Amino acid sequence: MLIKSLTMIDFRKYELASMDFGAFTNILHGENGAGKTTILEAIHSLAYTRSFKTRLDADLSRHGQVGYQLKGVFTDHQENDHEVRLKVESARKKLVSVNSKNLTSRAQIIGRFPLVSLTPEDSELTFGSPEIRRLFFNKLLSQVDAVYLENLQTYARILKQRNALLHSYANDGTPIDRIQMSTLDDQRAKISAQLHEARSKHIAEFKKLLFAAYAELEDEKSLKMAFISNVRSTAGELEGLYRNAYQDSLAEDMRKGTTTRGPHRDLFTFYLNTKDLRKFGSQGEHKLVLVAIKFAEGRFLETFLGEPPVFLLDDLFAELDVKRSTMIVESLKGGHQIFITATDLADLRHHGLELEGDTLQIIDAGKMQANG
């Protein structure tokens, strides 16, 4: 997969800008505030209907404007072109089309145009809360498993209904309809078992790719990863275990006014030399693990989708020494389209990036904005 061209209208600082991209390495060059990251945001928004920096479309509209438009042409490995258009007309109206066919849900585009983004915001994946890691793996698995995505959406709807009942009880004293609660938990137990099985299967494959990727970058430390279910598996049928766990936790849920057990509380934890990375890892160790996660993400997507993803790399070399940076650059030269942001081209060369040749294109983000 690669993106050949991009047009932005009223997106962030860009009033109107169109650009073509090279099939291999694209350097987005410019001073801070020139709009380098905005180009990455636009590409991500076309593939996933939202930015990696914000979920609020109002944040993306140019100052004084309501809404924005994006158009991109993607090319798959069979050299078929796909035109994606995204038009936001208001906070409640977003139109997405692929090859002039309007989409009715995000699910219809998830996994079609695989991307891997590595941005400063991604540091929260190893530093941040368990919810951030759950979101990452939900997004990843949803791209390769349509049933997983459907189950995830169904589970979210059931959880929203259940929490509304619990909230009304805990805050207003509204009696809980036990029959309705039991029905919701029966439905939730069935979906939970399916989510658990899919996570277990896919995470086992992801781990292999992650450990291999990390070993390419670091041979002195050992990386491990754990998927820890909020409902511990013991002997017995999985759906029944979830159903029993939900019955046992109902009293606590009523007291707290929220649902305390289920896949929405599962944990994904990384360990470096048996120590919890989140608690004990240095800045450099976090960055190296994050790069390995992103490499594994790309290989996972390519394995299941049969399509090499596009890599969006913002501030790639921060916290990395030259040796590791050179190794990363070499690892990325595998036929993928890559976007790298840079304020200093000399610094890129210092970190091992060749800035000459037919496989590289340099785009001046500030000039694009000025010509818009």
Image (cartoon, grey):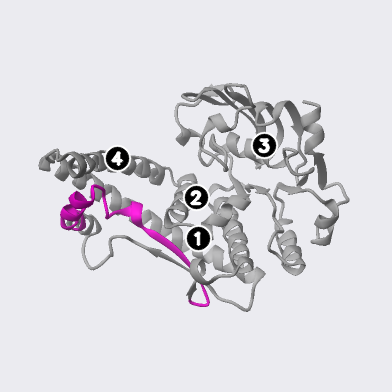
Q: Quadrant of the C terminus?
A: top right
Disc 2 and disc 4: Cα gap in Å?
23 Å
* Foreground pick, 259 / 195: 259
Dot 4 or dot 3: first in sequence order is 3
Residue 122: percent from left, percent from top: 57, 53
Circle 2: is it few (<14), some (14-19), or many (20+) Cα within 10 Å?
many
**Highlighted magenta segment, given as a residue range:** 245-274
- The amino acid pointed to by label 2 is Leu
Where disc 4 sits, the SS reads helix
Disc 4 and disc 1: Cα gap in Å?
29 Å
Circle 3: is it few (<14), some (14-19), or many (20+) Cα within 10 Å?
some
Label 4 with label 1: CB-CB less than 8 Å: no
Q: Mark 1 points at which residue?
A: 206
User: Does 294 appear above or below 343?
Assistant: below
Q: In which quarter of the image is the N terminus?
A: top right
Q: Name the residue under label 4.
A: 160
Dot 4 or dot 1: first in sequence order is 4
- The amino acid pointed to by label 3 is Thr
Dot 2 or dot 4: first in sequence order is 2
Label 2 with label 4: CB-CB less than 8 Å: no
Q: Name the residue under label 2.
A: 140
Q: Does the magenta stretch include residue 272?
A: yes
Disc 1 and disc 3: Cα gap in Å?
26 Å
- The amino acid pointed to by label 1 is Phe
| Residue 293 occupies quadrant | bottom right
Q: Mark 3 points at which residue?
A: 75
Residue 224 appears in the figure: no
Left or right relative to 252: residue 206? right
Disc 3 and disc 2: Cα gap in Å?
21 Å
Where disc 3 sits, the SS reads strand
